[in-house]
Amino acid sequence: MVIAESVAGALLLIFGRDTDWMFVSAIGLLTGLRYSPYLFPNAPGWVHLVIAIVLAAICFAVLTRSQGAAMALGGFLTGGYLLSLLIMYPRNPWLPFVAGGLLVGGLVFTSLKNITLIITTSLIGALILVNLFRVPPNGRIILLAGLFIAGGLIQALLLNIENKAGGPS
């Protein structure tokens, strides 16, 4: 599961805004990996991976039917996943997820698609990658900030190149 999270985190960090299908599927996978142990605490690891893959496939299927619905779903999952990474609430792990999902998915994501995608995917990718390393707290903050800034700059540069070339935005 660490490999799946690290690959999804790296792809989100660099290419999150460019590939709607990958973003929505990756956030579905990450949400499934994070919350399936709460739903099925005694299940083996492969069951959690299967649940995550099924959730990613559902997110992809929604995207093929309606891009607007997929962006709303992706925004909800992104906001929930992001807030659950930033705020650990052990008594009720669903509370930060639902609050973040409603805030980001319902309010921000639907109105400012490009900038929200760049910020959220860069932050989620950076948080996932930082969690893979054992560094002291000060180093963790510096690494997180560096990865977040690098991911945001790379995605902004790619957006700028697309805009100059007349590509999709």
Image (tube, grey):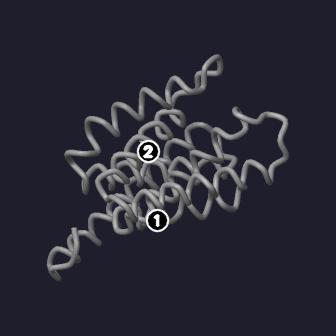
Q: Which residue is mark 1?
A: 22
Outermost residue toward the top in this view: 91
Mark earlier in primary sequence (1, 2): 1
Name the side, left or right, on which 83 lies relative to 138: left
Q: At label 1, which amino acid type do we have?
A: Met
Near-viewer residue (31 or 114): 31
Outermost residue toward the bottom in this view: 165
Q: Position of residue 88 (x, y in %)?
A: 58, 26
Name the side, left or right, on which 103 lies relative to 100: left
Q: Is residue 67 above or below residue 31?
A: below
Count the numbered circles shown: 2
Q: CA distance from mark 1 to mark 2?
A: 13 Å
Residue under the point 20% across and 71% down: 160
Q: Position of residue 28 (x, y in %)?
A: 53, 51
Near-viewer residue (41 or 67): 67
Q: At label 2, which amino acid type do we have?
A: Thr
Residue under the point 14% across and 78% down: 164
Mark 1, Cα crowd under 10 Å, few <14 / some 14-19 / many 20+, is some
Q: Position of residue 136 (x, y in %)?
A: 64, 40
Residue under the point 81% across and 49% down: 45
Q: Is residue 10 above or below residue 81?
A: below
- Mark 1 in CB contact with mark 2 (< 8 angstroms): no
Q: Which residue is mark 2?
A: 78
Q: Is residue 79 above or below residue 123?
A: above
SS assignment at label 2? helix
Name the side, left or right, on which 81 lies relative to 137: left
Q: Which image quadrant: the C terminus?
A: bottom left
